[in-house]
Amino acid sequence: MAILRREKYPYVGMGVVATVEKLEEHGAYVTIDSFNGIRGYLPINEIASGWVKNIHDYVKEGRKIPLKVIMVDPSKGQIVLSLKKISAGEQEKTYSDWNKEKKVEAIVMVAAKALNKKKEDAYKEVIWPLKDKYGDAYSALTLALKEGDSALKNANISKAWVDALYPLIQKHVKTENVTISFKVSLFYEGKGGINKIKSAFSNLIEWGKSKNVLIKASYLSAPNYLIKIEGSNYKELESISQEMKDFLTDYVKKTGTTVSIERLKS
């Protein structure tokens, strides 16, 4: 089941899920399940960091694997992929995103069948508009679960689709938050430094409530702290994360010190 995209080709650096179709001496041909089912090539020197003596020791025909796009040549219709360049965190996110997209498609296709619509119609009339409005379609479905069918209507989804889709969302979708993490280095000289740090994080948490996101602060090792921001929409959370950094930087500056904020890889 290939996920449909409006774009003809993936972009360089994109993580994709692919099925290994054919192994050859110098690489493997794959079908990219998460991007229109188009074909790509995994060279043997992009499978592992060291020397690969036997390609069969690393990849198997029929197996689904996460890969990173490292070259796209539209003039030749070529897509080159890498296994060694996709980190463990990127692999996890790639699989997670793909599974969410599959779930969205499965739910929407049940509604499509009831409306006598095709897969292409489901993407053009529902999935892509939801993605345009909310950043990704799965977040849109979880938002609809929280706020009602207005979340669908606000993406200009037709009444027929909304009436068929919303009961399925209520039945099959569970609320799920996404998290962005930061390492914060914060130190105050003199007495009362700990209390000032506690006050800074307390104000940050209250600020998060005003933005409808959950902010958690925990101690790592002096002077480092872990800040996690949780929300239901990744695109919105990215924007709020920058606002969070600005808020905390301004707050500690007014209280007599500076802060270092480093985004942690997921």
Image (spheres, rainbow, N blue to C red):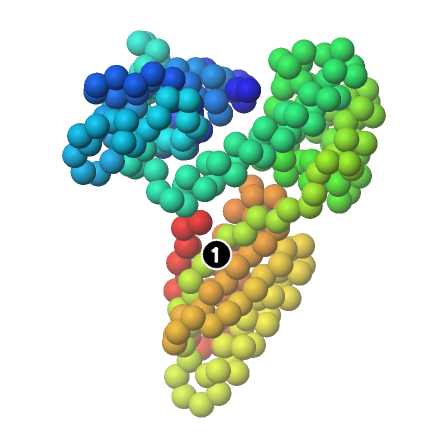
Residue at point 48%, 22% (across, down): 33
Residue at point 78%, 14% (across, down): 115
Judge by depth and name the residue closer to the eye, 202 or 67: 67
| Disc 1 element | strand
Residue ranking furthest to the bottom = 191
Residue at point 52%, 38% (across, down): 96
Quarter where residue 262 is shown: bottom left
Judge by depth and name the residue closer to the eye, 100 or 150: 100
Q: Could you tell me if residue 259 is visible in this image?
A: no
Q: Quadrant of the N terminus?
A: top right
Residue at point 39%, 74% (across, down): 221
Circle 1: is it few (<14), some (14-19), or many (20+) Cα within 10 Å?
A: some
Q: Could you tell me if residue 234 is visible in this image?
A: yes
Image vertical order of residue 213 relative to residue 253, above or below:
above
Residue denoted by label 1: 181
Residue 67 appears left or right of 97: left
Image vertical order of residue 1 relative to residue 226, above or below:
above
Q: Position of residue 22 (x, y in %)?
A: 34, 16
Judge by depth and name the residue closer to the eye, 23 or 39: 23
Q: How many marks?
A: 1
